[in-house]
Image (cartoon, rainbow, N blue to C red):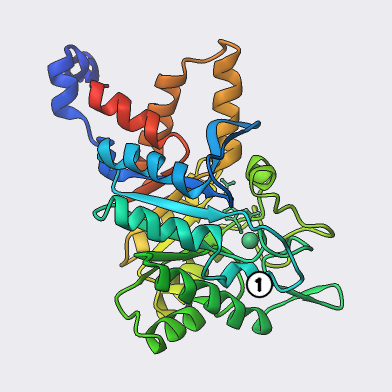
Amino acid sequence: MFPIQRPRRNRRTEALRRLCREVVLTTNDLVLPMFAVPGRGVRREVPSMPTICHLSVDEIIVEAGRAAELGIPAVLLFGIPEGKDPQGSEAWSASGAVQRAVGAIKSACPDLCVMTDVCLCEYTDHGHCGLVEGGEVVNDASLELLARAAVSHAEAGADVVAPSDMMDGRVDAIRAALDDAGFTYVAILSYAAKYASAYYGPFREAADSAPQFGDRRGYQMDPANRREALREVALDIQEGADMVMVKPALAYLDVLSDVAAESPVPVAAYNVSGEFAMVKAAAARGWIDERRVTMETLTAIKRAGADFILTYHALDAAQWLREGD
Ligand code: PBG
Ligand code: ZN
């Protein structure tokens, strides 16, 4: 008891603080999400996500090169199609923006790990993550289409495919399809505990993927549920997920902590678009210190149990880590 116990002694100097630090964020923890679009010479900033751009293939290799040069191990690709239809058929087109971007990045930066988001919502005219029949998002009929998209990413050279649709059984369907096509070495990062969150708002503007009717609460998780995340994670691991994700990150650190305590496979957290936009907006007004808030946020996500973090701050954070934070 005080005055014997004085926790401040361990915080007195920077050297002591460095010795006693429990969690250290490194560039190895970061994955940079990017938006691939058709065309050439396109570098168009997403209004609600300052510094994040729609990139054509020629520009995406420039951005991937920056990430690789800074030591970021991986990127995650989303695609914007030329056109949308009810099935989202451009999702598995060999000449789609994502498929071409994967090939170009693997040629330009062979050591960079390329992950691809597997979903239909960017590609369907109704904006839902699966097939719609009679006003409902149907589960089983969606699986084959998701598997087709995943195989097309593997054919393009993706190292990791990341299904974000939240259909039941999609990890199993994708694993089987990848193996049938000879891609036994391609890993699956499952968006296992993905919540129906308002924090995806800026992303839906960026990906033009807002549902045209209804919402995603029939397939994404209820934000009120904690225990259910462990069920989703356990099922996805049984189905063959190599890594699992909790998404969003900040409002779900309790879930992340639970999953990290139980999961036998690596756990990712997605620091989503709305979390990023709030930091950027407040920083632009001079209301917060962007660098310190960003590093504190990413450290907190790691402290809660993330093995790696998908974040739009990745390039900035890697630069700050290089400078010495
Ligand atoms: C597609 C998908 C979404 C995100 C990642 N993949 C949006 C959604 O489910 O509506 C969100 C990413 C972000 O907000 O940064 N299913
Ligand atoms: Zn989707």
Badge 1: residue crowd in 10 Å (few <14, some 14–19, many ≥20): some
Give the residue drawn at x 59%, y 19%: 282
Give the residue drawn at x 56%, y 58%: 194
Q: Nearer the viewer, residue 161 or 298?
A: 161
| Residue 219 image offset from top left, x and y in percent | 68, 67
- Name the residue tied to disc 1: 89
In the rendered image, the vertical position of residue 166 relative to residue 24, given as above or below: below
Give the residue drawn at x 54%, y 17%: 283
In the rendered image, the vertical position of residue 320 relative to residue 166, given as above or below: above
| Residue 191 image offset from top left, x and y in percent | 50, 62
**Callout 1 secondary element:** helix
In the rendered view, does 56 fall on the left or right side of 46? left
In the rendered view, does 172 fall on the left or right side of 273? left
Res 260 visible:
no
Q: Nearer the viewer, residue 39 or 231?
A: 39
Q: In the orientation shown, which residue stands out farthest toward the front?
A: 40
Name the image quarter holding the N terminus. top left
| Residue 290 image offset from top left, x and y in percent | 47, 20
In the rendered image, the vertical position of residue 162 relative to residue 239, given as above or below: above
Q: Quadrant of residue 21?
A: top left
Q: Is mark 1 within 8 Å of ligand 2?
A: no
Q: Nearer the viewer, residue 43 or 28?
A: 43
- Ligand 2 picture quarter: bottom right
